[in-house]
Amino acid sequence: MSATTDEIAPDLFRLSVYVPDFDMQFNHFLVRDEAPLLFHTGLRSMFPVLREAVASLIDPATLRYISWSHFESDECGALNDWLAIAPDAEPVCTLVGKLVSVDDFSQRPARGMTADDVLETGKYRFRFHHSPHIPHGWDASVMFEETRKTLFCSDLFHHFGNPEALTSSDLIGRTTDAMQRLNSGPLSGYMPYTRRTAGVLNSLAELKPETLAVMHGSSYAGQCDDLLGDLAEVIRENF
Ligand SMILES: [Fe+2]
Ligand SMILES: [Fe+2]
């Protein structure tokens, strides 16, 4: 197992681990700033390679914030491993995540973010946009960096394979293929379509993101609002 590191936007590094058994990338994002932030801890089994990848960019002991979308092993499984090597690191998740799962699991209490809270790391400002059950999980959110307009969108736009780090090609075709593949197998039901789904995705489109930091597959650079609008239809048709 190894990690591939790419700077997909200034100070934004994508640390990618491809797992052939799943034909799938697991991507983790390091924001290099005065107070460094890691989004997605990775699975516990990935911690050694991710620690090495982070160490090629910053001293891992200086990590200040560790964050994710929803409580699942690929999102936050290695949280306690990171907390053990970074004494000032603070877990950051939604208030629901903190109250329902994280504070019982984590070695240190989390900062539970509401829609009004802003996390500043120096140059960059992060806000959580609560998105219950989108992509899945009551505690789910996506994180938006307001300075450079990057949306850390977790499992949204999930696609398979080991593609390029960053693309400006339409992600909808790839995402549709992945949703169809997932829904025809034992992992069906990956993303519920609820009466909130289109509204939440449209409100994310109104943020006019310019980069999508995608957990499984290529990240995207370009105008993202149309993609987010189209994604609601893909989820509705497949789930
Ligand atoms: Fe997930
Ligand atoms: Fe995921």
Image (cartoon, rainbow, N blue to C red):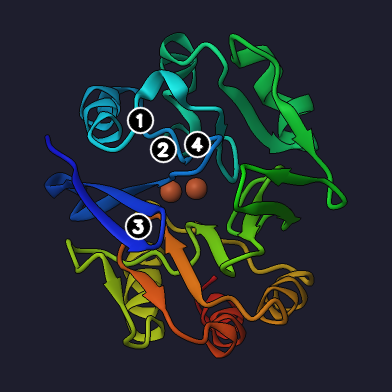
What amino acid type should be assigned to the residue bearing mark 1?
Leu
Q: CA distance from mark 2 to mark 3?
A: 10 Å
Q: CA distance from mark 4 to mark 2?
A: 20 Å
Q: Which residue is mark 1?
A: 43
Does 234 appear above or below 105? Answer: below
Q: Which residue is mark 2?
A: 74
Determine whether label 3 and label 1 are within 8 Å by CB. Answer: no
Q: Which mark is residue 216?
A: 3
Q: Position of residue 146 (x, y in %)?
A: 66, 64
Asked if ligand 2 lies within 8 A of label 3, the reply is yes
Q: Position of residue 188 (x, y in %)?
A: 44, 58
Q: Local crowd at mark 4 within 10 Å, few (<14), some, or many (≥20)?
A: many
Q: How many marks?
A: 4
Does 223 appear above or below 144? Answer: below
What amino acid type should be assigned to the residue bearing mark 2?
Asp
Residue positioned 68% across, 54% down in the render: 133
Q: Which residue is mark 4?
A: 36
Tell me which corner region of the image, top left, top right, bottom left or bottom right, holds residue 109. Answer: top right
Q: CA distance from mark 3 to mark 4?
A: 22 Å
